[in-house]
Image (cartoon, grey):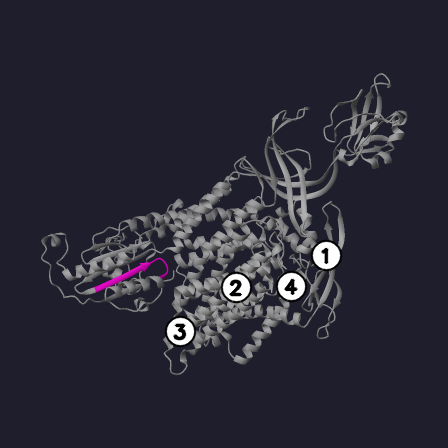
Amino acid sequence: MVENTKCECGHQNSIGTVLCESCGKPLFDEHGTSLLEMRYDGVARRSQKANPTWIGRIWNFFSSVKVAVYLIVITLIGATLGTIYPQENTFINIDPSTYYKETYGWTGHLYYLLGLSRTYESWWFRALLFMIGTSLVICSLDRVLPLYRALSNQQVRKHPQFILRQKVTYTGDLPIAANRPRQDPAFTANGHTAENEAAVQWVNEMAGILRKKRYRVRTDGTALLAEKHRFSRWGPYINHIGLIVFLLAVLARGIPGWHMDQYLGFPEGKPVKIPGTPYYLENEKFSVEFYSPEEVPKLKNKDQVVPKKYETQAVLYECVEHCGASVEEPVLKEVARHNILVNEPLNYKGLMAYQFDYRVTPQLVSVRPTLKNKQTGEVYGSFELKMNHPQETYTVGPYQLTLQRYYPEFGFENGEPVTKSNEPKAPAFVFIIEGPGLRQGGEPYIYFPREIDKVNFGQDRINAELGSRLELSVDSMEDVKISQFTSYLNIRVDKALPYIWVGAAIFMIGLVMGIYWQHRRIWLRIDGTRLSLGAHTNKNWYGLRREVADVLGKAGILVDAKSLETGGTVRES
Amino acid sequence: MNLDSISSSALLIAFLIYCLGFLLFVISITGKKWSNRDPHQHAKRWGTIAFIVSAAGFVCHLIFFFTRWYVAGHIPTSNMYEFMTFLAMMIILAFLILYGIYRSPVLGVFSVPVGIIIIAYASVFPNEVQPLIPSLQSHWLKIHVTTAAAGEAFFAIGFAGGLMYLLRTVDFSGSSALSRREILGVEFTLLVVAVIIGFVAAVFGFHAAGYKAQFSTQVVITDKGGAQQEITRYTDYVLPPIFKPNGGKLESMTPFLGMKEPLFETPSWMNGNNAGRQLNTVVWSVLFGSVLYGLLRLIARKPLGAVIQPLLKGMDAEDLDEISYRAIAIGYPIYTLGALVFAMIWAAEAWGRFWGWDPKEVWALITWLFYAAYLHLRLSRGWLGKKSAWLAVIGFVVVMFTLVGVNLIISGLHSYAGV
């Protein structure tokens, strides 16, 4: 059966239309008295029109607000599940397969087995977000185009059924003379029936009052359409666009190079390469400050101290030469310098370094030992000895020191000297010293920069006779450079961030447009002396009623705002 | 008299003025039937007086806020006490704004008490000025916290409006399954309010009586040098310990009604700061609240909702629906801006990521999704009246869980807000 969708005014509507797109006459329930369904102005949404193909079916599914609300509610419940126990990503070094069981018992283990310890990375949670995104796009497209068409082709003179079945209506006789036909040939030639001049005048007067209320008014003889803040109707679609931009920006972080996130430790005074970049970052000095007890009244636990400031004085270098894994020292060029605080990260061309944590890790950085003649006390000079990448040779006065062996953490294994790690925890240097009074080809000399190692490992005993003639030692603590702290920084690149903010901004603009303004329309027509007025808003009916009552009052019709309500609520579907 | 004490007295004065304002709003409604007066005139006159009094309370509240700001040197929104007093201030402000729009004294009868209860709730927490830890040292503390609280304040008014709508429309004499369910729902909501009052009463009551108990727990901490060491941590209880801390050892305890040691141990899965003490407090609050509710119920001999209903007789149900919805609609963009957008900007600046699925963040998102569902159901699916009112009531429960519950049960980055 072909549905007859032609209205009595002659307009051909598409299938699914509720109110005639032209005159507004209800196409269903023509003689009813219930309130009209005014959503999207009664035009057919795309999803209601065609015979659905399979694409159409998917479209129809996602175009439903009911489905959208279900998706929101399921996502909401899913998100709560992830907050029952801490997520895996909140820990840095755990084995989740045992951690949850040990910490929270069998419920924790179940939580882990169900994959809830990674709720927000799970396929189903991502699928939900993806479906919400799809729903946003389809819901918006399905409605915005027909609505745009309907609102841009509005007829001034509406069917009385349309006017009087609005939620806010007024009908009554005007104190004007009835049916004095107007003798203006131009007027009747316009296609109107003869109309009451007084009625036209009343409508024009009304138009003036409404314009003062900042309505945009169009009249058509004895009919009037006043409208304001139509732009607020686009608010929801704009905020949906914002959300889509936001979600796309989140997805864009998957593009290679757009997103980097790593945690690195930076001991003081040693540039550390940032993997995956040409940059090195040096923590020149880290400092931590605590509030003094006077500043913190009534601490609950005496062992608790309240931190005041964490600061890493950072220098960022770019590697300009020998950057690969070559033997040669990379050549670094300083590009940025910043004191990193918790709320003040370093930012160099999108490479961000955030203060994350710190550790007390006392370690030698370098010493400046002096070469002396032990017998005469003569001082030959001193040199800078670094714990990391020490130089091969040093010239001190008449002597030449060649580094033969370096043990960052000296120790013995099966009676053989070895280094236990690459950390300078107990450094030992074996030099071949050449110079006056020494054998041809030099003599070996072992040097322990730390006094404790020197005693424990017996530096003087190993050096034997040479040790009684020459001595390498530091004179004061000024000649010792120690790294007290290792600062842990979170190094990030997030190229999607600007798009995230753009999405959020568009969303906010749309939200404010749609919520803080309301699209209000008032239709009226005079038939004889009978005024029929209907008004519609997409929200805040209270305000609309007051405004209509006020406008009518200014035109001499005193009504109580509340009495304009035709009663009943919009049908619930 | 120094500024610090001026600040505290200003809050106390504001609290008392709000109580007076509340009583005046009640008079403006109940006094309509007093002899020889025009009910409309009466409501208008007393409503205006009550409004002015509440506004005066708000001014005192502002004095409290700004003097404390001056004393602390940073905006007083950095711990639970400060945040809750600020939230209460925003609730009163939201009420004043909506009263300006709708001029409905009944709104005062319901909104002002929400503010009063939240101030009372705040006063349970330690009110010393605390210095800011590094992650809070940012101008976003001002922007994020204040806007989020302002949005939540409007949700609170939405809650008050929704509850009023339900009290106005639920048929308390009905015996159908539906009305029985509705009565149950309303009574449960009132019970929850009683529990919050019970919480404040319990803490103040026992504190005034000088009650004390102390537990010690052994905790392993990792110091900054990377070494692990075991230390003893002490937890003080102001309420008799029904639940002791997980693994806690009783150090000292004032006997209470023959109870010489704690009855139960807090389960280990509660992860919040001082979970044991907080659970114990919740149990006491529920006990006190239930007793309070039970007593009122015994006196009234009918559902409490039925007692309140006559107050709302003159009120148009649809107007209540509108007020509740309007409050939420006004609050939603503010909440989005404060609790999500500003929060993300700050998180990006302080922690290097705009979103990290921290429990507090997740719950802020849940709140947001909940109200998004509310708006969609209302605007596109035509959910008006009771359905909408229930959502407004439940929504505020979600808000309060986000603000209080998350800190109680779950530990996370925002746990500094807890006590």
- Of the residues shown, which amino acid type is indicated by label 3? Arg
Most common secondary structure along the magenta stretch:
strand
Q: Residues within 10 Å of mark 4 (few under 14, many from 20)?
A: many
- Of the residues shown, which amino acid type is indicated by label 2? His
A193 vs A389: above or below? below
Q: Quadrant of residue A66?
A: bottom left
Pick the residue in front: B245 or B32: B32
- Of the residues shown, which amino acid type is indicated by label 4? Leu
What residue is pinned by disc 3? B45
From the top left corner, tell me how far across and down residue B315 is, in percent: 40, 72
Pick the residue in front: A354 or A234: A354
- First-in-chain label (3 vs 4): 3
What residue is pinned by disc 4? B279
CA–CA distance in space, label 1 to label 3: 57 Å
CA–CA distance in space, label 4 to label 1: 24 Å
From the top left corner, tell me how far across and down residue B300 is, in percent: 52, 79
